[in-house]
Image: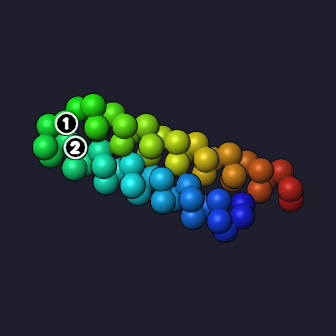
Amino acid sequence: MSTGEKAKAKAEQVVGMTVRTLAHAVHKDDLAAKGAALEARGKARGAKEGAKGSLKH
């Protein structure tokens, strides 16, 4: 996994988790869903990059 893609995936996860948590705190369900989607996209990106890295070895 390239360092840039790994950092991008982790950043999406952290930002998504933060948005989701803060949105739940202020009872904004639509914003919480967007945060959860961003977090899921970051996890998917990390899984994809991990699979690409494991196939190279």
Specify whether 41 is left or right of 30.
right
Mark 1 and 2 residues: CB-CB less than 8 Å, in contact? yes
Q: Secondary structure at mark 1?
A: loop
Residue 55 horizontal side relative to residue 40, left or right: right
State which quadrant residue 34 falls in: top left
Q: How crowded is the residue under tag 1: few (<14 C-alpha within 10 Å), some, or many (20+)?
A: few
Cα–Cα gap, marks 1 and 2: 5 Å
Earlier residue among tags 1 and 2: 2
Q: From the viewer's perspective, is 15 left or right of 27?
A: right
**Residue situated in front as seen by the camera: 57 or 32:** 32
Give the residue drawn at x 86%, y 59%.
Answer: 57
Where in the figure is residue 38, as x and y percent of width and height? 45, 43
Q: Position of residue 21 (x, y in %)?
A: 25, 48
Residue type at mark 2?
Ala
Q: Where is mark 1, residue-wise?
A: 28
Q: Residue at x 65, y 65 (%)?
A: 4
In this picture, is 52 found above or below 10?
Answer: above
Query: Which class describes the residues within 10 Å of circle 2: few (<14), some (14-19), or many (20+)?
Result: some
Instruction: Please tell me whether mark 2 sits on a helix, a strand or a loop.
Output: helix
Query: Residue 17: percent from the left, percent from the top?
Result: 35, 50
Disc 1 residue type (three-letter):
Lys
- Residue drawn at the location 67% of the way across and 68% of the way down: 3
Give the residue displayed 27% in from the left and 31% down from the top. Answer: 30
Residue that label 2 marks: 23
Please tell me the numbered disc located at residue 12.
Answer: none
Q: Colour scheme used in the picture? A: rainbow
